[in-house]
Amino acid sequence: MKPVNQKAWWLVLPVFLCVAFSAVLPLMTVVNYSVQDIISPERRVFVGTEWFAAVMRDPELHEALLRQIVYSLSVLAVEIPLGIALALSMPATGWKSSLVLVLVALSLLIPWNVVGTIWQIYGRADIGLLGATLQKLGIDYSYTGNATHAWLTVLVMDVWHWTPLVALLAFAGLRSIPDAYYQAARIDGASKFAVFRYIQLPKMRGVLMIAVLLRFMDSFMIYTEPFVLTGGGPGNATTFLSQFLTQKAVGQFDLGPAAAFSLIYFLIILLMCFILYNWMQRVGTADAEGQGHA
Amino acid sequence: MHEDRFHKRTIFLVAYLLFAILPIYWMVNMSFKTNDEILASFSLLPQQFTWANYAKIFTDESWYSGYINSLVYVAINMVVTLVVALPAAYAFSRYSFLGDKHLFFWLLTNRMTPPAVFLLPFFQLYTTLGLMDTHLAVAMAHLVFSVPLAVWILEGFMSGIPREIDETAYIDGYSFPRFFLTIFLPLIKAGVGVAAFFCFMFSWVELLLARTLTSVNAKPIVATMTRTVSASGMDWATLAAAGTLTIVPGAIVIWFVRHYIAKGFAMGRV
């Protein structure tokens, strides 16, 4: 067990102050807005939970929220297995390993609006490789005209953009497993699947937890990429929560409702992450116990 | 049997790499073309190869200063993040203290606020402090996502170092700062590398906050790039060249940390 030492707080204090300054302070401003009707900078009226009630009843919000949840779950369902598979097939040592790592990680380091731009060009039917190829194959592909195509393009773009994050984390988790585990498995004559299920997967739990949480929260907040690629369209097909919120806050300048919406937004992410976190913790503990009995 | 599996893996890997590289290849391809060629024809390689798009970016100050601004605030962000996150991660990995578990999860919750939520409060906060349009403002704003992640990553690495090393050093009369800097830091340098990589990654690519908090002096490249959209249509060629150049710093950073990632880390606490 770790020794109890309250002085350790001094070491955490700088982080606490930094985050308080750059996150808690702005968040409090948002809380402040959410309960007021701001008519002008000098005139504001306290309205209590009125904005929250109004926002919760907004059918457009319900649509955007549903679209967002479907999108984020799709992202997780594709990127996590694909990332693990990729990590398992990446070479472990030598120059090939270095090369593959760099190539795989490349898409992570491209600014988000450039990501949108790349796919905007790439998907154009007249000048883009993807769009032109699909056209040649006889698919009338258009991410600006067809809602399904637009949605799928945003999803594929996200898979392209972010699967490497899952892969890098999973890869790092795999590399931290001592050789002795594999040797023991070989002696026991364990199948490839058994090695994956009972050695690699449990050992990757920590990094996968981070991967799942990061991918969930970031995909839930996605803004720049679909904004650049499709501008939320056609119609509202790719207008996700963040864009909906920005339209409200900046476009219509409804500060109160936008703030109330922000807080609800934040609480949804927090709740979902909390559920994911606890669920993965439980699965992990059950796994450890199962192994103890065996 | 074994051979067969090896082939399947290689085929999968090559297929993924193609999927990963093709969009980037297309952009690089376009960056060496003229706008006329981009719009007029479809070709896998530039027919009239030109450096003009790159020349434009390197000679026009309003273009290249964007890269410098971005690199400056990313660097400030990385340094501040590591300086505050290192001691905190050490505290989390070595001691129990009041509220440690809650604080650890709370850190991550700050990453869960959509940047769009922060736009207006940040704007007001930094205007009040007179920091608008400075590199520092963007670097501070980006701390919201870099610090929590850096603490989580560093804590994972530090927990992998046996505590006996600390105890022996203290018995030998090392003070905390001296122990930390001369003994402990070299042991977790892989963790520092990986944490720095993640800081760089999330700060370099962010647009919304960076664009809101700057106007001229600290305008990042990602904001400058939006210039290529104008009434007369898109300047695809310059956009492609500018986009290609934004990949270069990231590629350099990943090249430096590749060994640290390949060595592996488990992030035990979560």
Image (tube, coloured by chain):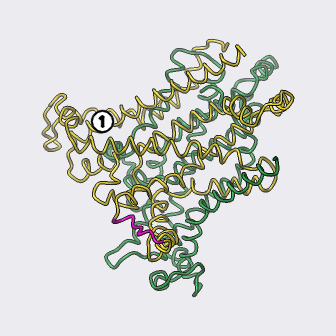
Q: Which residue is nearer to you in this view: A238 or B200?
A: A238
Q: Which residue is nearer to you in this view: B169 or A218?
A: A218
Asked if A184 appears above or below B32 in the picture, the reply is above
Residue A246 in the image: state x and y as whole percent. 30, 49
Mark 1: amino acid: Thr
- Label 1: which secondary element: helix
Q: Quadrant of the C terminus of chain A?
A: top right
Q: Main secondary structure of the magenta part?
A: loop
- Report the number of discs: 1
- Chain green in the figure, letter: B
Residue B218 in the image: state x and y as whole percent. 45, 58
Residue A163 in the image: state x and y as whole percent. 57, 49
Q: Is residue A246 left or right of residue A187?
A: left
Which residue does the image show at 47% across and 39% down from the upper left? A216
| Residue ranking furthest to the bottom | B48
- Chain yellow in the figure, letter: A
Q: Which residue is mark 1?
A: A29
Q: Which residue is nearer to you in this view: A15 or B43?
A: B43
Residue B60 in the image: state x and y as whole percent. 49, 75
Query: Which region is colored magenta?
Result: A138-145
Which residue does the image show at 39% across and 59% down from the upper left? A150
Q: Is residue B50 left or right of residue A188?
A: left
Sort mark 1 into few (<14), some (14-19) or many (20+) by Cα contacts within 10 Å.
some
